[in-house]
């Protein structure tokens, strides 16, 4: 999977990608992330990338020429990639969108700063807008990183083979996870559910499934409408 990221803070993006599963995927060549800084496409001596909004008001707006210059530089390197802007006005990102982009093989993400991007760049250069949800971030970088992470995990060989195969066979997709415990068996007077110590793997699997179903119903009941439920699940619910 190849990503391009347009950002005024490439160190922020590169820093976050130098840890854990994603860093190893990049080392192994399964994932590549190429940053492009609009500041490197500014024409003036001060390398200006923002200006005051027409019509007045607080804050600054990303000026079109440096932003479009950075987008076009990435488009030249990733000609088949959809170009997506991270904005609070976008459609909410979810696992279905992540799957769609993972299947594509390449993606350009455009992170904004200040009050936003000049609307003409969104109209001329952008295929779609995506948000992480209804809360206020300081810019698009954290959102771009969340998307790089979620999409990369779906690329074969980014996670261990064992891990992804395991997740498929459980078929728990679309449900909240069951709770987890590890050693010690008693911590500050609190034990763990006896079934997990029983060694009865069929009973443990059924119990975990029921905990997942119960938590989903309690916390996110709307998820049950799209979850793949069998007859035993329906009886339990
Ligand atoms: C306080 C400024 N807001 C005035 C109504 C507008 C605003 C502009 C720019 C709010 C946030 C931002 C920066 N946010 C993003 O670039 C962003 C974002 C987000 O804030 N929330 C959820 N998803 C995303 S994706 C990009």
Image (cartoon, helix red, strand yellow):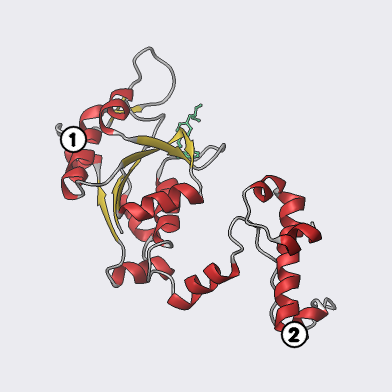
Q: Residue at x 69, y 79 (%)?
A: 182
- Image coords of residue 23 (percent x, y): 36, 68
Q: Is residue 127 above or below residue 32?
A: above
Looking at this view, name the residue that lies furthest to the bottom.
Answer: 199
Residue named by callout 2: 200
- Image coords of residue 162 (percent x, y): 48, 78
Residue 132 in the figure: left or right of residue 119: right
**Is residue 72 or residue 176 the one in the foreground?**
176
- Image coords of residue 111 (percent x, y): 36, 41
**Residue 42 numbered tag:** 1
**Residue 125 numbered tag:** none
Looking at this view, name the residue that lies furthest to the front.
Answer: 231
Q: Residue at x 20, y 30 (%)?
A: 65
Q: Is residue 139 above or below residue 188?
A: above
Q: Is residue 45 above or below residue 190?
A: above
Q: Given contact means CB atoms under 8 Å apart, are the residues at marks 2 and 1 in contact?
A: no
Q: Between disc 2 and disc 1, whose residue precedes?
A: 1
**Is residue 186 or residue 53 the one in the foreground?**
186
Q: Residue at x 75, y 52 (%)?
A: 217
Residue 229 in the figure: left or right of residue 122: right
Q: Ligand 1 near label 2 (Cβ, under 8 Å)? A: no
Q: Residue at x 20, y 43 (%)?
A: 75
In the rendered view of the protein, which quadrant contains the N terminus?
Answer: bottom left
Residue 195 appears in the picture as rendered: yes
Residue 171 falls in image quadrant: bottom right
User: For the image shown, how many numbered marks are present on the structure?
Assistant: 2
**Is residue 197 or residue 85 the one in the foreground?**
197
Choose mark 2 or mark 1, whichever is in front: 2
Looking at this view, name the residue that lies furthest to the top.
Answer: 55
- Image coords of residue 231 (percent x, y): 73, 61
Residue 19 appears in the picture as rendered: no
């Amino acid at each position: 999977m190849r990503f391009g990221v347009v950002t005024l803070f490439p160190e922020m993006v590169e820093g976050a990608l130098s840890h854990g599963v994603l860093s190893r995927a990049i080392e192994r060549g399964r994932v590549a992330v190429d940053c492009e800084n609009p500041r490197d496409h500014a024409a003036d001596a001060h390398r200006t990338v923002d200006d005051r909004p027409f019509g007045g008001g607080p804050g600054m707006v990303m000026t079109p020429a440096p932003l479009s210059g950075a987008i076009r530089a990435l488009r030249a390197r990733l000609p088949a990639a959809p170009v997506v802007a991270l904005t609070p006005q976008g459609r909410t990102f979810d696992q279905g969108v992540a799957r769609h982009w993972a299947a594509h093989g390449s993606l350009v993400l455009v992170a904004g700063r200040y009050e936003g991007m000049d609307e003409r760049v969104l109209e001329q250069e952008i295929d779609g807008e995506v948000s992480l949800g209804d809360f206020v971030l300081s810019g698009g970088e954290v959102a771009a990183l969340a998307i790089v992470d979620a999409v990369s995990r779906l690329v074969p060989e980014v996670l261990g083979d064992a891990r992804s195969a395991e997740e498929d066979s459980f078929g728990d997709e679309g449900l909240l996870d069951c709770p987890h415990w590890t050693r010690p068996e008693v911590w500050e007077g609190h034990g763990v559910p006896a079934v997990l110590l029983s060694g009865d793997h069929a009973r443990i699997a059924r119990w975990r499934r029921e905990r997942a179903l119960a938590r989903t119903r309690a916390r996110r009941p709307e998820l049950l409408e799209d979850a793949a439920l069998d007859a035993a699940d329906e009886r339990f619910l």
